[in-house]
Image (cartoon, rainbow, N blue to C red):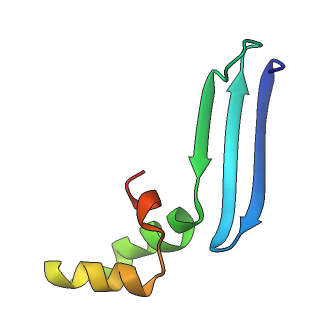
Amino acid sequence: MPAGETYQRVESSKGELAWYVVSDGGDKPYRAHVRGPSQTHAVQVLEHLAKGARLEDIAQIMFSLDACPPEVDR
């Protein structure tokens, strides 16, 4: 990989998917960060929607936001 950094985003089926990659010129990136579409529209909004909700209702609130489950643990 050439040395440097780049930020690229594409429109995926559930929203914007973005990659941030930093390379020091080696064969593998020095740093890589992925921002999935669920982070922008589901995880951040969940904080506001969950205020005052019961714990057992959180799963249904997340389901209604159409979050991608593998992305939620990031």
Q: Nearer the viewer, residue 48 or 74?
A: 74
Q: On screen, 68 above or below 22?
A: below
- Left or right of 73? Residue 10 is right
Residue at screen point 70% across, 27% down: 22
Residue at screen point 68% across, 46% down: 19
Expressed as whole percent of the image width and height from the top left, the position of residue 2 reads 84, 19
Q: On screen, 53 above or below 36?
A: below
Q: Quadrant of residue 48?
A: bottom left
Expressed as whole percent of the image width and height from the top left, the position of residue 43 reads 43, 67
Expressed as whole percent of the image width and height from the top left, the position of residue 70 reads 43, 59
Residue at screen point 78% across, 48% down: 8
Residue at screen point 54% across, 73% down: 41
Can residue 9 be seen? yes
Quadrant where the N terminus sits is: top right
Q: Quadrant of residue 21?
A: top right
Q: Nearer the viewer, residue 27 or 41?
A: 27
- Left or right of 57? Residue 21 is right
Q: On screen, 29 above or below 27?
A: below
- Left or right of 41? Residue 23 is right
Expressed as whole percent of the image width and height from the top left, the position of residue 74 reads 42, 51
Can residue 51 be seen? no
Q: Quadrant of residue 13?
A: bottom right
Q: On screen, 45 above or below 17?
A: below
Task: Give the residue furthest to the right.
Answer: 2
Q: How many marks?
A: 0
